[in-house]
Amino acid sequence: MNIQIEKENLRKHIWDLLFKEKISYRVNGDYNKIPNFKGSDFAAKRLSQTIEWDESKVIFCSPDSAQIPVREYALKDKKTLIMASPKIKDGYILLNHEDIDDLSIASTIEGSYKYGKFDMNLPKIDLVVEGSVCVDKLGHRLGKGGGYGDREIDYLMKNEYISTNTPIVTTIHPLQLVFKVPTEKHDKNINMIVTINKVIRIKQNFKGDFVK
């Protein structure tokens, strides 16, 4: 089977499953979007309790709805937050908690435009958080099909804002963890998965448990 068809079939399977199980905050489901899953706040809290988070001063995050709690925790914990604009249309947004009087609003796309500074000259990033449709335990990630997550990671790597040792995390609902994600050469892997009930570290040089 063509790999693009495999990917689309897997996306549809996940979107159908989350809709059937009423996991999404969206009434009509997450079709063609990164799932905005119920429990995203618990996954964000679990991420904020990891040593990787504790050791990070600068956090990069995708603009997906499910990662709003991640962005809010970053600002509450006085991290420098870098956010990709939707579809990277306006580049990247730098948010400093000291310049913000409403951290909850600033964590949204609209709020990031209000409080943030558009800047392509970024500081070194300690941790990256991406939204996903699904992932597997080898770190293969499937997005909604636009390639934006891959482009974000590629840009950060090529410009040396991150290294091969940087934690690249996704927060997901357990139903988004699958046995195998079909991959292509250009697909970028993640190395840490956080769900509402567990943390999976994929690289052996991470502190704590890991999956071989």
Image: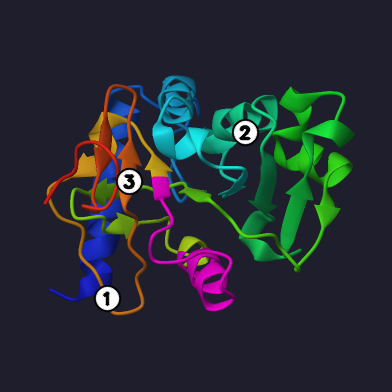
Mark 2, residue position: 74
Q: Is residue 104 above or below residue 6?
A: above
62 relative position to 103: left or right: left
Q: Which mark is residue 192?
A: 3
Q: Disc 2 residue type?
A: Ala
Residue numbers of the magenta segment: 150-169
Q: CA distance from mark 2 to mark 3?
A: 17 Å
Q: Residue at x 82, y 23 (%)?
A: 102
Q: Secondary structure at mark 2?
A: helix
Q: Secondary structure at mark 1?
A: loop
Q: Are marks 2 and 3 in contact (CB under 8 Å)?
A: no
Q: Residues within 10 Å of mark 3 (few under 14, many from 20)?
A: many
Mark 1, residue position: 184
> Dividing the image into 4 quarters, which one contains the N terminus?
bottom left
Q: Residue at x 42, y 63 (%)?
A: 145
Q: Residue at x 50, y 49 (%)?
A: 127
| Total labels drawn | 3
Residue 15 is at least partly visible in this image: no
